[in-house]
Every structure is written in structure tokens, then in C-alpha cells.
Amino acid sequence: LQVLPHVKESTAYILMRPFLSDVPPTTFPGAFPGKGQDVNSKWHQHLCNLMTPIPEVRPGDGVFWHCDCVHAVDAVHAGQQDSSVLFIPTGALCEVNAKYIERQRARFQGGMTPPDFPANHVEVHFSERGRPQHLSHLGRRLLGFGDLPWDGEGELHRECSARYGEH
């Protein structure tokens, strides 16, 4: 894993990049509407040169970084064992997040990439991928299998659980 911990500076660079003379009009380098922002050597060589590898990670270690940090993993896994990078978002209960849980639940069941990530669907035919029965009780609630996981008795909680939770 490599990170670029300078969030303000890298964000400013990415936002200003389209205005430099080597970028064609109507081009936002590395942007994929509705998906993510790719930082690559063609358009963002200065940022790529500043990527910093994390120290050696041993079994049981955890590595956390802010989702707004530019980050990268090796294009090819050359290790002897499986490796994983998990994206664990959190958010408040609102209709937008409840709708996301509903979409994500369906994608999880089908082994597909989450709806806000580039669609590579590499686990669709993987026999050992995670399935609803592998989830803990809390994990099932977090994906909307049953009531949504936010505690509360308010109208929004009842409405979102009834509309977007799976019963």
C-alpha cells in the first residue's frame, strides 16, 4: 500500500489539473463520472512521484488511512498468501444512506463490486466469496438484512428500516 498523505495539496492539484495547458478542453484527467478519481502517471506524475509506501505489515497489523488520501496498491499481487484491502465506510441514517444499503445488499448477494466503485465484478464466479450466511448478526443488519443498524425509535428510523431493510 502506498499513500499520499497531503490531502489539501493533492486535492488542489487534482482540481487544478484540467486548467493546465497540456490538458485538452472538456477533459478532467482521471475522472470517471459516478465512479472515482484515478491518479495516474499520464496526468498526475508529480503526485505519483510523492507516493509513500507504508512500513512492513505483519499478521494482525491494521493500517488505516483517510478515504480522501490518494492511495494505491500494487497492480499485481506477487505474495504467497491472499491480501486484501477493505473499504469500511460509516455514515448517518438518512434516506440517501438507506438507499445505498439497499443497492449494496443486492450487489453483495450477487458477488458484484459496490455501486460506487468501478465495476470489475471479479468475485461473481468465485465460489469462496462472502455470502449473507457468513455474516454476523450485526453484519447482516449493516447490509440491511432485517432492520437497519442504527439505534433509535424515531420516524426516520422506522421509515428507512421499513422501506430499505429486508424483512
Image: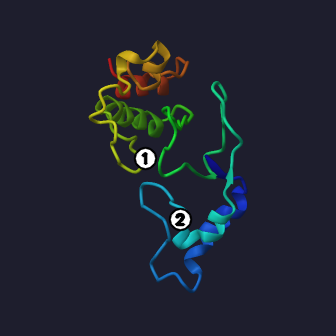
Q: Which residue is mark 2?
A: 40
Instruction: Tell me the tag on residue 142.
Output: none
Give the Cα distance between marks 2 and 1.
Answer: 20 Å
Q: Amino acid at mark 1?
A: Asp
Q: Residue at x 35, y 48 (%)?
A: 119
Instruction: Tell me the tag on residue 116.
Output: 1
Q: Residue at x 48, y 52 (%)?
A: 75
**Along the line of sight, which residue is nearer the eye, 139 or 150?**
139
Q: Is residue 104 left or right of residue 45?
A: left
Q: Amino acid at mark 2?
A: Asn
Q: Quadrant of the C terminus?
A: top left
Image height of 135 relative to 113, above or below: above
Image height of 95 relative to 133, above or below: below
Upstream in sequence: badge 2 or badge 1: 2
Residue ranking furthest to the top: 137
**Along the line of sight, which residue is nearer the eye, 18 or 71?**
71
**Along the line of sight, which residue is nearer the eye, 1 or 77?**
77
